Structure formats: structure tokens, C-alpha cells
Image: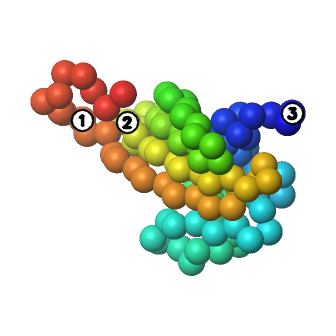
Amino acid sequence: MKDSLKEKAVSFLQLVVSGEIREAFQKYLAPDFRHHNPFFRGDADSLMLAMEENHTMNPHKVFEVKHVIADGEMVVVHSHIKQNQEDLGAAVVHIFRFHHNLIVELWDIGQPIPEDSPNENGVF
């Protein structure tokens, strides 16, 4: 295998953040891909269009990987995503399920980073 599943998951997200959404989908998604984002239909085309719209509105997104965990065909990417440099951003967890080295399923969970938090450890 040329790239590990961890590398594929991160590369997919990096392409999406950089606006290369169609390339990311062509390169990494299986034909029977489905996702669980509750704000869009569960098919690839609906998610791709939403990601393209978000990139148009936020072309200077910042993406920083904090942790990547793999267990068999499951990969979890914990990251800091900011819509722009000034944005506090969100802590985001993407959960990928791969099959035959392609992404067949995706979950994403986000938590906005508050301006003031009593937790001295921060979100990362």
C-alpha cells in the first residue's frame, strides 16, 4: 500500500480545505460513499456541493492536525479548523471508515472554541 490510511484521511482533508474538493472526492471516495453530517443529505454529491460552497465563503481556511488514530479500516483525525486567520475556530473530529483503501463512510463532530474557558488545559 503506497499511502497509509492515516495519510489518506489527512490528505483528503487537506485537499478539501485547500479547495480541491472534487479532486479529493475523485481520489479518495468509494462509489458507495455515505456520510453522517446531519445538515446535508447523506450522499457524496450533497456533501461535495456543501464543501464547495463553504470554500467559496471561506477561501482562507486554516487546518491543523492534532492527532491521527487508526484501528483497522477506521481512522480518526482530530484537528483545529479555522474559517480564517482571526477565527478562534473549532476542534473537529473526522471519523473515516475505509474499505479497499477508499473512504466508504465519514462522520464529523465539531466543538467551537470558546473565547473564555475555565479549563486551563484548553481544547487541545
Mark 1 or mark 3, which has the lower sequence index? Answer: 3
Q: List x then y, in percent, for residue 76.
A: 53, 42
Residue drawn at 63 percent across, 69 percent down: 34
Mark 1 or mark 2, which has the lower sequence index? Answer: 2
The amino acid marked with disc number 3 is Lys
Which quarter shows the N terminus? top right
Please tell me how many numbered marks the rendered image carries: 3
Do the CB atoms of the residues marked 3 and 2 lie less than 8 Å apart?
no
Q: Mark 3 or 2, which is nearer the eye?
A: 3
Classed neighbour count for the residue bearing mark 2: other residues with Cα under 10 Å, few (<14), some (14–19), many (≥20)? some
Which residue corresponds to mark 1? 115
Do the CB atoms of the residues marked 1 and 2 lie less than 8 Å apart?
yes
Q: Mark 1 or 3, which is nearer the eye?
A: 3
Q: List x then y, in percent, for residue 84.
A: 51, 39
Q: Indicate the secondary structure of the residue bearing disc 1.
A: loop
The amino acid marked with disc number 2 is Leu
- Tell whether 27 sits left or right of 54: right
Q: Indicate the secondary structure of the residue bearing disc 2.
A: loop
Residue 4's quadrant in the figure? top right
Residue drawn at 69 percent across, 53 percent down: 98
Which is more toward the observer, 31 or 37? 31
Which residue corresponds to mark 2? 88
Q: List x then y, in percent, for residue 32.
A: 74, 71
Q: Is the residue 56 above or below the residue 65 in the image? A: below
Which is more toward the observer, 115 or 33? 33
